[in-house]
Amino acid sequence: MSIIGICFRKNKIFQGLKFFVAKVGLYTFTRDTYHYFFAKDALRRRRLALKFYSQFINPGDIVFDIGANVGVRTDIFLKLGAHVIAVEPNPKCVRDIERIYGCKSLFIEQCAIGNAEGTVELMIGDQSPLSTTSPEWLKVAKKSPRFACHQWRETIKVPVRTLNSLVQAWGLPNFVKIDVEGSEAEVLQSLSQPIPCLSFEFNIEFISQACKCIENISLMENACFNVVLEESFEFCFTEWISNSRIIKWLVSDQNRSLLTYGDIYVRLPVVTADTKAEVKAEILEML
């Protein structure tokens, strides 16, 4: 048997065991026990995540996990006592979430989120977190050393809903996490009312997308920002900053030289001195 065949077989066995312990209600206990003895760094990161997100999420809150993938953040939000609406277009990932985390506080929407309802092509990566509905992001990713070894060989059509339609269906969320590999701006364009707190992913290689998110009209009024690099669960700034400052930081030469990613956090309401016209002018000047 080839090395690839052996690895595939081991992965199938691992997935089967994972689904079995989840079915009998022992997944969290088994995972945490394994991490305690054999993967303490994973346990440390999980504890950091719980502490970090607790500043945004309280028991009983509504949380949208847009781009839930296999439910890593969904699990954190559930542990904090939230009612989680996990939004994921990849049917394989949806099955994993249902099998592992299914509970009365979890609701799954199998769709993509965009600026208009309809259908879209989902390009599925060889690692599920890299799946995307954005052809522009995919072009950039294929040219980046970070993604050079990855492939996108399968494409499926998936339904698209808007963020507004989710709010109408589930109520106004207390927190929204957006991680959709290049379509973050399209997600935010479909939001017509402010949300107390949200986050969206950025990639240095595709920084224009993050600037579009910040420019989005629904985020302009009374918003302040902060940044977490990669999986550090630690803010880069000791205080929340204005939209113009976060853009200057994003497009700085120092950041452009780094091949990294992270999440931009947005909090409302905080009054800033920036006007919509000033911020748009600064964006055009700096890009």
Image (spheres, helix red, strand yellow):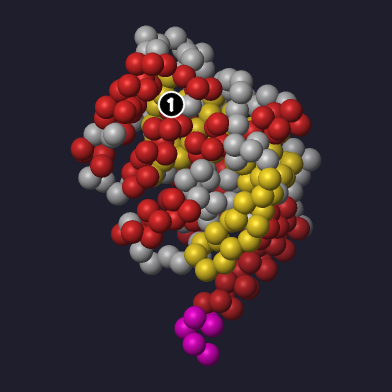
Q: Is residue 17 above or below residue 274?
A: below
Q: Position of residue 210 (x, y in %)?
A: 41, 36
Q: Label 1: how many residues lie within 10 Å, few (<14), some (14-19) or many (20+)?
A: many
Amino acid at the residue labelled 1: Glu
Residue at (32% x, 21% y) in the render: 281
Q: Does dot 1 land on a helix, a strand or a loop?
A: helix
Q: Is residue 90 above or below residue 73?
A: below
Q: Position of residue 228 (x, y in %)?
A: 39, 35
Q: Is residue 2 magenta-colored?
A: yes
Q: Is residue 261 visible?
A: no
Q: Position of residue 110 (x, y in %)?
A: 70, 49
Q: Which residue is mark 1?
A: 215
Q: Position of residue 9 (x, y in %)?
A: 59, 78
| Relative depth, front residue between 76 and 272 | 272
Drawn side of residue 254 relative to residue 282, left or right: left
Quarter-wise, where is residue 163 in the image? top right
Residue at (48% x, 26% y) in the render: 216
